[in-house]
Amino acid sequence: MNVIETHGLTKRYRRKLAVDNLDMTVAAGDIYGFVGKNGSGKSTTMKMVAGLARPTAGEVVLFGDPERGGATPQGFSRIGALIESPGVLASLTARDNLVAKALALGMTHAGDVADDLLGLVGLDPLDHRRVKAYSLGMKQRLGLALALVGGPDLLLLDEPFNGLDPEATRAMRLALVRLNREHGVTIMISSHVLDQLDRVATRFGVIADGRLTAEFTDEELHERCGSSVRLRLAEPERGLALLEQALPQATFRAEPDGALVVTGAALDEVSAACFSAGIEVRELVQQERDIEEYFVELMGGADGEKDGDAR
Amino acid sequence: MIALLRSDAYRVLRSRWIWVAAAIVTFLMLAPALMMRWTSMGPIYYDDLTSSALAINGIQMLAAVMAAIVCCDRTDIGFTRSILSSLGERARKVWFAEKCVFSLALTAVLLAFTFAVGLLGLLVSGVPVANPEPAWQVAAWLGCAWLCAAPYVVLTVLVAHLTRGEGVTIGFAVLASSGLLEGGLLIGVDFLYALLGGEFLTVTAAVGPWMPAEIASAVSAGVRTMLSVENAVGMAPALRALVVCLPLTAVAVAADALLVSRRDVA
């Protein structure tokens, strides 16, 4: 089942088109990494998914229920969100923040719920300091705990790693993975911290200028970002057909500039296959592409769309 | 609604500002009484409870400012997002209405607290009340005072949800509840009317008694004035409060729940 489906989702703020005809799918159990530059439309998309902003056009279907957005009969949505800021009441303690939200959702034993969640995110339930005395990392963790009140089935996290030190980042990452694996929570995370995102996400969506330029799985990402062979052929179409026969285990991707990128085969294998098939080769080079470089390339704009199998 | 009210009550009771406000009200009500007690200065007796012994002037301003603080905590927009993202479409409308209801309930608590501390002050001062009104009249007086504060409180909540700015909302709360906005508006209309050849202050004279600030002023003058029909329009301020303040409050709550709730949260 798809937990999130957007169809032609569009948001316009006066003259600025923040999100443009976005079709996105997040399946149940995914940890969906949502990547894009500042101002690319990530937060606006997440706000529309969370119901905090109304789409100018298009629709968001949650939990396969276009009518009620998957809301419970009691009127609660199945979403927990941490969007833009940690969303805390700075003049209260962390526990009071959680109790206030638990009470708002009509939960009994709000105090117990608060204590459990504070433990889950690594904060001390007996800490009587007001939240304004907390570091940004602690506020982020409290924000996550607040998003978890009510046991949501979908968690929307906007830049959850912001301001976290390495230890806190690791703790946050592990907490997210645990929530996903042990509690089956589908998670959508937007983040600039690509190496952290790469460690948790199972699927990725890349947004540039409000448009989804690419969507791929973790495996596909690593296929594309590992070592590959780039070659330019005199007769690309014929050459591609012959190489596909000669190297059935390899994956081929046509680049916008006409070059062919082969993954899953070593340089000497490609070279030998070209020689045996009598293919005229004009360029043959081993290349390495790291994940950050790949994302930056995709975030660069509409170029990603030209990438043959990007979507 | 009940869950949201409980949550807001918890949030407010755990905040410092509410206790600071309570301390200020207590000080303002008890300090003069203590001075009277210790210095033996002040009146020999009060005529009655509502017009001289207990003062509730300015209660609507305090109530409106409290509503502004409740709805505009400088850092709570993220908390609001967190709550609203956990509510379904219909429950979000309820959330907006609940903010109005909670602010009105807080106003009632403020009035009751002020009244109780006022009575305590009266006991402390030792000044007798010559003709205390019957309980029903005092209750009606408090009810009318609440009704007069209600439009300001709800309009402040509306402004808070529209602007999401604490400064603007508190500014509106003070200007509106002090009657300055209404006065300014009437003077402006009068000025235009005079430019068109009419007599200056005609509009103020005709409409002024129907404005909430004027009604609130008459109500705070005590039960006798509140129930008297001997005034410019020949209708008791208590009745005018029902005719003017009740519909105004209902319209503002409806606008907040049905229209403002449709806006993007952030």
Image (tube, coloured by chain):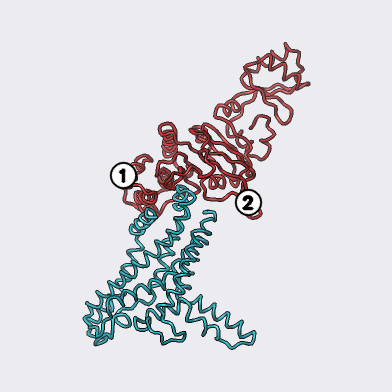
Chain colours: A red, B cyan
A69 in relation to B166, above or below: above
The residue that disc 1 covers is A112
Residue positioned 73% across, 13% down in the render: A275
Q: Are marks 2 and 1 on the same chain?
A: yes
Mark 1 lies on a secondary structure that is helix
Question: Which of disc 1 and disc 2 is earlier in sequence?
Answer: 2
- Which residue occupies the foreground of this view, A141 or A280? A141
- The location of residue B27, given as percent across then percent down, is 30, 72
- The location of residue A205, given as percent across then percent down, is 58, 36
Q: Chain of mark 2?
A: A
Residue positioned 34% across, 68% down in the render: B110
Residue type beneath disc 2: Arg
A139 in relation to B59, above or below: above
A213 in relation to B43, above or below: above
Residue positioned 61% across, 49% down in the render: A11
Judge from the rendering whether residue A235 lies leftward or rightward of residue B47; answer left or right: right
- The location of residue A131, given as percent across then percent down, is 38, 52
- The location of residue B128, given as percent across then percent down, is 22, 83
Real-space Cα separation, disc 2 to disc 1, in angstroms: 42 Å
The residue that disc 2 covers is A12
Judge from the rendering whether residue A31 lies leftward or rightward of residue A212; answer left or right: left
Judge from the rendering whether residue A248 lies leftward or rightward of residue A88; answer left or right: right
